[in-house]
Image: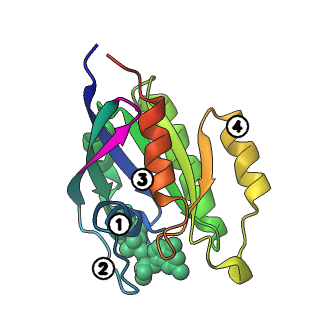
Amino acid sequence: GNNNLNAKLVLLGDMGAGKSSLVLRFVKGQFLEFQESTIGAAFFSQTLAVNDATVKFEIWDTAGQERYHSLAPMYYRGAAAAIIVYDITSTESFTRAKKWVQELQKQGNPNMVMAFAGNKADLEEKRKVTAEEARLYAEENGLFFMETSAKTASNVNDIFYEIARRLPRA
Ligand code: GTP
Ligand code: MG
């Protein structure tokens, strides 16, 4: 088969959860303490080599602010993969992430590879959501789960790599 794959990937989650920071870390290897809130959505691309294949991710980094919610379907429609992001220091962001999962389960591509990312794992002292609770939720809903930190880079490349590994091959 063809070893070069293009994959549309969308990031969804509450404002401030760290979607843009995860993308910036993955694509540019950078982190900003004062990352600006996304307006509408932003596009990035990045290529990953996985075993004998090359996956070119076409990444839509959506805006978490509620007023942009109605735009989301444009970005998740036809997406091969999604990363649903919450902030481990915010129970509201965890609740919001579960709502996104429900929406994708109802309206998204049924074969979508879904990753559940508990971001800001470096802020252990402020943790409000246990890894156990999130892992259980992810298991029950057929997502794979990782805690990440855009700040320290922990698990950031890993989550994209794991998505690439799980994408159906042509
Ligand atoms: P919207 O664009 O409004 O939806 O937000 P977002 O999900 O893109 O969040 P963004 O990446 O803008 O990050 C929000 C804030 O959290 C920024 O000040 C980041 O510096 C900070 N942040 C993001 N990821 C991490 C992380 O892993 N650890 C820590 N400590 N801070 C983080
Ligand atoms: Mg953003």
Q: CA distance from mark 2 to mark 3?
A: 16 Å
Callout 1 crowding tier (Cα within 10 Å): few <14, some 14–19, many ≥20: many
Give the percent coordinates (x, y) of residue 51: 41, 33
For the residues marked 2 and 1, what is the alpha-carbon distance in whole angstroms? 9 Å
Q: Which residue is mark 3?
A: 12
- Residues at marks 1 and 4 touching, judged by CB atoms closer than 8 Å: no
* Residue behind label 2 places its C-beta within 8 angstroms of ligand 1: yes
User: Counting residues from the N terminus, which is met first, the one under dot 1 or under dot 4?
Assistant: 1
Query: Can residue 65 be seen in the rendering of this structure?
Result: no
Residue mark closest to the camera, 3 vs 1: 1
Q: Residue at x 51, y 75 (%)?
A: 152
- N-term-proximal mark, 2 vs 1: 1
- As helix, strand or loop, the secondary structure at mark 1 comes to helix
* Disc 4 from disc 3: Cα separation: 19 Å
Q: Which residue is mark 2?
A: 36
| Image point (61%, 76%), residue name | 122
Magenta segment main secondary structure: strand
Amino acid type assigned to the residue bearing label 4 in the image: Glu
Residue 89 shows up from this direction: yes
Instruction: Answer few, some or many: residues within 10 Å of disc 4's Cα (few below 14, many 20 plus, some between 14 and 19).
Output: few
Which amino acid, mark 3?
Leu
Closer to us: 35 or 93? 35
Question: Is residue 48 a member of the stretch shown in magenta?
Answer: yes
Q: Which residue is mark 4?
A: 139
The reply to whether dot 2 and dot 1 touch (C-beta < 8 Å) is yes
Viewport quadrant of the N terminus: top left
Mark 1 CB lies closer than 8 A to ligand 2: yes
The magenta segment: 46-52
N-terminal of the pair, mark 4 or mark 3, is: 3
Q: Residues within 10 Å of mark 2 (few under 14, many from 20)?
A: few
